Amino acid sequence: ELNNLERHIINTFHETSTSLISKEWLVKTISNYYNPNDLNTELPSTLIEYIQYFVEQKKAEVSPASTTKFNVIMHKLQRMENDLGLKIAIKDVNENFKAKFNDYCKSKMYAINTIQREIGLIKTFCKHARTNGLEVSPQMDNLKIKKEKVNHIYLTIEELEHIEKTEMKFEHLENAKNWLIISCYLGQRISDFMRFNKSMIRVENGKSLIEFTQKKTKKLMTVPLHSKVLEVLRKNGGDFPRAISKQRYNDYIKRVCKKAELNEKVIGRKQENISKDKNVKIFRKVEREFEKWELVTSHIGRRSFATNFYGKIPTNYLIYVTGHSSESMFLQYIGKSNKDLAIELTKYF
């Protein structure tokens, strides 16, 4: 009984903002454990309604991007319920639900990794419901969908040097090219690097550092500026390039890489309209062979940094810069397998 109470308290703690933890919080949490029916009457028991409740509860704690993800899953579940004539309760999230959700998403041409990620988020909603005393399936914790291996696209050091030397005819493409170089040598998300300005730079012991708070994680970061970044800043009068929107940046860097003749054929995934009706647009990520420049997006800078410097800079330093929570997540991010690690290890024998 004490083990069950401990699990309940710890689970509730993980679902609660640290600013709300107090003696009163502990008393209420223990009370909810012994009197769950008092709480159950106030909470929705269906999955969709609970997601709405979850989004409302977490709106002050999570990023707008996370809220968007939650709403996307909720709307997908609403379409699934309407199409299949279902009403999904929290306690119904079991192996049977997983199979139906998997089949439904596949029928709508969603990628395996999208389904896998969304099953994980649905489990998050259910675990939150459990901490609030709602009944969940005993199968819920073990629901898993195997992740599909994808080909990770990144820009090599040689390709980056070629991009640097390629002259752009238009100012907006030169501006985007400079941001692309910066992103590949700083390893940050576009939500962070597109906010950079010279006031964030400081010099210590002759080394230039940039200090900022990551938008996604709220983590205060201090990152050294690579010589390639400093070179771009010098060309730009000591400041970062002109900021542009994510949509334009994605469009421009494709054109930059096309101009740099990154025409190698590679297997990758790209958003395409899969609708057969010309009046309807349904976008899904399609995997096939593309010219490399077609697959370049704002995220390629972060992945290029992690991949290019892996094995050259100690992994714990790279993880600090990229912000991954563990080494295993970092290695998965850059697509390193056990075989790759074994080959890296041979360098030390």
Image (cartoon, grey):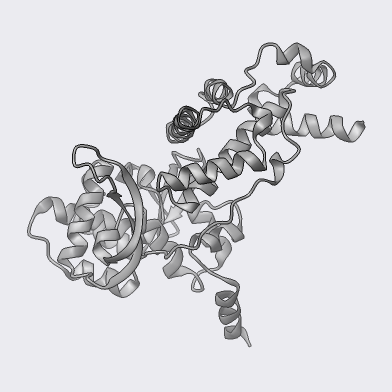
Quadrant of image for the N terminus: top right
Residue 347, image x, y percentages: 57, 84
Residue at image location 58% in from the left, 75% down from the top: 341
In the depicted structure, whether residue 44 falls above or below residue 196? above
Query: Residue furthest toward the left?
Result: 169
Observer-nearest of 160 and 197: 160
Residue 293 visible, this orientation: yes
Q: Is residue 61 left or right of residue 64?
A: right
Residue 225 visible, this orientation: no
Residue 279, image x, y percentages: 19, 37
Quadrant of image for the C terminus: bottom right
In the depicted structure, whether residue 79 falls above or below residue 232? above
Query: Residue furthest toward the right?
Result: 1
Residue 226, image x, y percentages: 37, 62
Query: Residue furthest toward the bottom?
Result: 349
Observer-nearest of 245 and 38: 38
Q: Is residue 160 left or right of residue 71?
A: left
Residue 299, image x, y percentages: 37, 53
Q: Is residue 199 left or right of residue 217?
A: left
Observer-nearest of 51 and 248: 51
In the depicted structure, whether residue 244 falls above or below residue 28? below
What count of labels does the image hold?
A: 0
Q: Quadrant of residue 231?
A: bottom left
Residue at image location 42% in from the left, 64% down from the top: 152
